[in-house]
Image (cartoon, grey):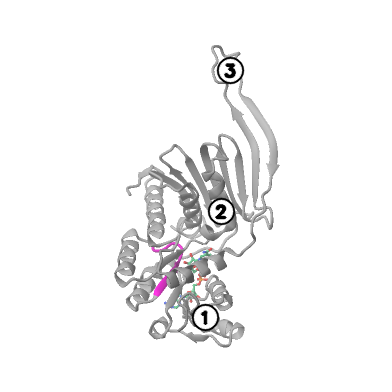
């Protein structure tokens, strides 16, 4: 008898545009995964996959993939199709990994969570950064209290990017930062506000500034743009004891810890006595594993299927991110007024 922990899991990937082939590459190389079939509406994308992996079956009809003997399905189609694809896959009793964001609507996300539970299937969302060793380091560093009290966080995710046609830049890029923030802080915001503008395509915001307000007073700003000359993927966390910068564009030194800060005097009776004291200490660069986050994510998906457990980025985590994105979009249409988030 084959040990359940060792058995091969047949995988199908729907959508093979920019991101899908990266999933195919990983499932093709991970031991214990059998990269079985790929579906895409475009024949040229299927030909591309066949050229790289002649053993992988291809189809233009994703229903053929759902009818095949795959146990797990990864969905990497445009966001507007996620709900339908994931729902049909669950109805065919497949385990499902859906690319971020899980859906465009929280009711749809809730429905998928309920369906996965009813069918006893794994529902996971592709929040790749939750599997990124640098983000893991950030989470542990904050949890250990090394930064002191976290004051505020700034996330910048901009470049001259791919303009999406079915979603604005908040739905496209902010899921990454929102999922990182929820993961590293281990709490959910109470309010969100957003401002943005559509410069290139009518009514599809290509630049946006989103702010999340957390219960402990932490304010987190997210700047996302498809319209910027420089590629920046940076998160700065400022604490009372230290400050930390995570720069994902840096090839090796992704995390830098700054022993910098400013302290107010414990007490002062006069303005002359009130002097802030500045601290300029060392900058340290910890060694971070260079394992590919997407590979870790794909391995985690397979492990959860084998062991029947809930993924780190499960349906509920996906739903939380969708609720925040919905709130941000309500605020965007409402002149940037803060929207309450109810959990
Ligand atoms: N985790 C990450 O870091 C990351 C990065 C990029 C994109 N993504 C996500 O991946 C998903 C896909 O993004 P992309 O940039 O690859 O988009 P894309 O437009 O390049 O590719 C989408 C593909 O889906 C195919 N498709 C559309 N409808 C289909 C259908 N009914 N049946 C079969 N195929 C269909 C299209 O033909 C296309 O080839 C999105 O959800 C996006 O948010 C995630």
Task: Tally the numbered discs.
Answer: 3
Identify residue for label 3: 274
Q: Measured along the vertical axis of the image, is residue 312 above or below residue 119?
A: above
**First in sequence: mark 1 or mark 2?**
1
Quarter of the view holding residue 251: bottom right
The residue labelled by disc 2 is 135
Q: Position of residue 10 (x, y in %)?
A: 47, 81
At horizontal 35% and vertical 76% (from top left) the residue drawn is 88
The reply to whether the magenta stretch includes residue 263 is no
| Residue placed most toward the observer, 280 or 228 | 280
Label 3: state its secondary structure. Answer: loop
Residue shown at 56%/43% (left/top)? 237
User: How would you rate the neighbour count of disc 3 (Cα within 10 Å): few for under 14, some for 14-19, many for 20 or more?
Assistant: few
Q: Say which of 172 and 269 sits in front.
A: 269
Q: Tell me the magenta residue range.
A: 95-103
Residue 282 horizontal side relative to residue 276, left or right: right
Q: Secondary structure at mark 2?
A: helix
**C-alpha separation, residue under disc 1 versus residue under disc 2:** 28 Å
Residue most toward the front? Answer: 1
Q: Which mark is residue 124?
A: none
The answer to whether 108 appears left or right of 166 in the picture is left
From the image, state whether disc 3 or disc 2 is nearer to you: 2
Determine which of the numbered discs, if any, sits on residue 35 in the image: 1
Tell me which corner region of the image, top left, top right, bottom left or bottom right, holds residue 317.
Answer: bottom left
Q: CA distance from mark 1 to mark 3?
A: 66 Å
- For marks 3 and 2, give the CA distance: 38 Å
Q: Residue 77: x and y, percent?
A: 46, 72
Of 238 and 295, the residue lying toward us: 295
């Amino acid at each position: 008898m084959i040990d359940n922990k060792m058995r091969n899991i047949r995988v199908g990937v729907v959508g093979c545009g920019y991101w899908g082939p990266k999933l195919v590459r990983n499932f093709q190389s991970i031991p214990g995964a059998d990269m079985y079939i790929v579906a895409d509406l475009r024949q040229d994308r299927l030909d591309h996959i066949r050229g790289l992996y002649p053993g992988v079956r291809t189809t233009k009809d994703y229903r053929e993939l759902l009818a095949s003997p795959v146990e797990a399905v990864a969905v990497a189609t445009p966001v507007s199709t996620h709900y339908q694809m994931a729902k049909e896959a669950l109805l065919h009793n497949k385990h499902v990994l859906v690319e971020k964001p899980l859906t465009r609507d929280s009711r749809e996300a809730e429905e998928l969570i309920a369906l996965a539970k009813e069918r006893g299937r794994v529902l996971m969302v592709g929040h790749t950064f939750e599997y990124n060793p640098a983000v893991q380091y950030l989470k542990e560093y904050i949890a250990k209290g090394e930064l002191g009290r976290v004051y505020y966080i700034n996330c910048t995710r901009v470049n001259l990017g791919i303009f999406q046609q079915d979603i604005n830049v908040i739905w496209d890029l902010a899921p990454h930062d929102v999922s990182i923030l929820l993961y590293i802080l281990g709490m959910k915001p109470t309010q969100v506000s957003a401002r943005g503008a559509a410069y290139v395509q009518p009514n599809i915001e290509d630049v946006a500034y989103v702010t999340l307000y957390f219960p402990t007073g932490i304010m987190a700003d997210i700047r996302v743009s498809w319209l910027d000359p420089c590629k920046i993927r940076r998160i700065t966390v400022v604490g009372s004891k230290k400050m930390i910068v995570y720069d994902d564009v840096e090839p090796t030194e992704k995390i830098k810890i700054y022993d910098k800060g400013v302290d107010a005097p414990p007490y002062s009776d006069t303005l002359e006595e009130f002097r802030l004291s500045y601290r300029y200490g060392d900058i340290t660069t910890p060694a971070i594993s260079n394992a590919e986050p997407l590979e870790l994510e794909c391995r985690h998906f397979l492990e959860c299927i084998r062991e029947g457990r809930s993924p780190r980025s499960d349906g509920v985590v996906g739903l939380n991110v969708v609720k925040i994105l919905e709130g941000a979009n309500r605020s965007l249409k409402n002149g940037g007024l803060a929207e309450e988030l109810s959990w």
